[in-house]
Image (cartoon, grey):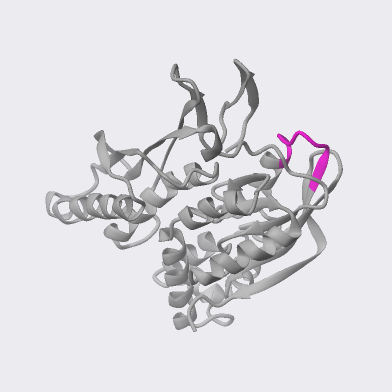
Amino acid sequence: MLEGIEKRTGEQVGVGLDSCVLPTRHKGISIVQTTDFFYPLVEDPYMQGMIGCANVLSDLYAMGVSECDNMLMLLGVSTELSKQQGAVVNPLMIQGFNDQAKLAGTSINGGQTVLNPWYIIGGVASGVCTRDEFIIPDGALEGDVIVLTKPLGTQIAVNAHQWLDKSQWWDKIKDIITVDEVKTAYLAAMFSMVRLNRTAASLMHKHEVHAATDVTGFGIIGHAQNLVSHQKANVDFVLDTLPIIANMSRVASTAKDHGQDFKLLDGYSAETSGGLLMCLRPDNADRLCKDILADGFESWIVGRVISGNKQARIAGDVKVIEVHCFS
């Protein structure tokens, strides 16, 4: 999450960036570091551990840092779990986090575990970097386009899956979506949250990304606004395309009619371990999307950077893309 950019000893240093960038006493070497934690979203504790790790690393990747040198794990074990439940859930959660770190090319060396009323999973990710290994997210230019590397709608998919066991809500949406469609969306959301943004982070350098952030709890427009407010140029971000997990736009609309407004089409629906939102030149964006597709995943040009007053908005004629993750 971006909150400010300041100068120190001639180098730009993030204060509340997706990751902080701290120059060390060694010339040309900085520590890029982030921390994050949240509550479980999915039923599988192993997958939840993987999502927790991916979510922590995502803030590092949003700065263009594709190599993490160390991670710490933060675990709040719920006091609501029985001894038998804890014996199953806790090792699986830890194993998922640890396995994901290995997939990211790093390892867990320390952390903290506490007892807590609510289960919490998260950690700290650190990279030791030279100046050319990270990208300060303040260089968006008029004429850039905006790329998103994962679909939206994870919050709705998780909620719709929970509603399968809550008749008061399932009865409200069962006429517009099938059980199989809900389960498919839930799996799509889970595997999207598990997927690391590491490839996209490495491509940020290859394709000269000017500014980036990851899309998480404040929704795509919340993070876009945060990003645009810290650009050096006087620009606006206009988002004209929203790629959304199939059928979730319809579920969100129906839920809104019944008093549950996820604000999906307004851009404020929360995401977890979402994609990177990146500003770069149009030709480079096309090449970046092709490189990501070669890795097996879709990405989308979702907006444009125009002259303005550092505001982000959803276009009035926004296009919704139904993303079918399994076919």
- In the image, residue 286 sits, relative to residue 322, either above or below, namely above
The answer to whether one can see residue 256 in this image is no
Q: Is residue 264 visible?
A: yes
Q: Is residue 130 left or right of residue 91?
A: right
Q: Residue at x 56, y 52 (%)?
A: 270
**Residue 25 is one of the magenta-drawn residues:** no
Residue closer to the observer: 246 or 199: 199
Above or below residue 179? Residue 149 is above
Q: Residue at x 36, y 49 (%)?
A: 53
Image location (x, y in percent) of residue 283: 73, 61
Q: Please tell me which residue lies in front, 69 or 75.
A: 69
In the picture, the quarter occupied by the N terminus is top right
Q: Main secondary structure of the magenta part?
A: loop
Residue at x-position 22% and y-position 56%: 92
x and y percentages locating residue 104 in the rendered image = 36, 52
Please provide percent x and percent y for residue 160. Answer: 49, 68
Please name whichever residue, 250 or 37, is drawn nearer the observer in this view of the structure: 37
Q: Residue 67 at x, y = what percent?
A: 42, 45
Q: Is residue 176 left or right of residue 124?
A: right
Q: Read off the magenta span.
A: 228-236
The reply, left or right, for residue 24 in relation to residue 134 is left
- Tell how many labels: 0
**Image quadrant assignment for residue 5:** top right
Which residue shows up at 59% across the image and 53% down it? 206
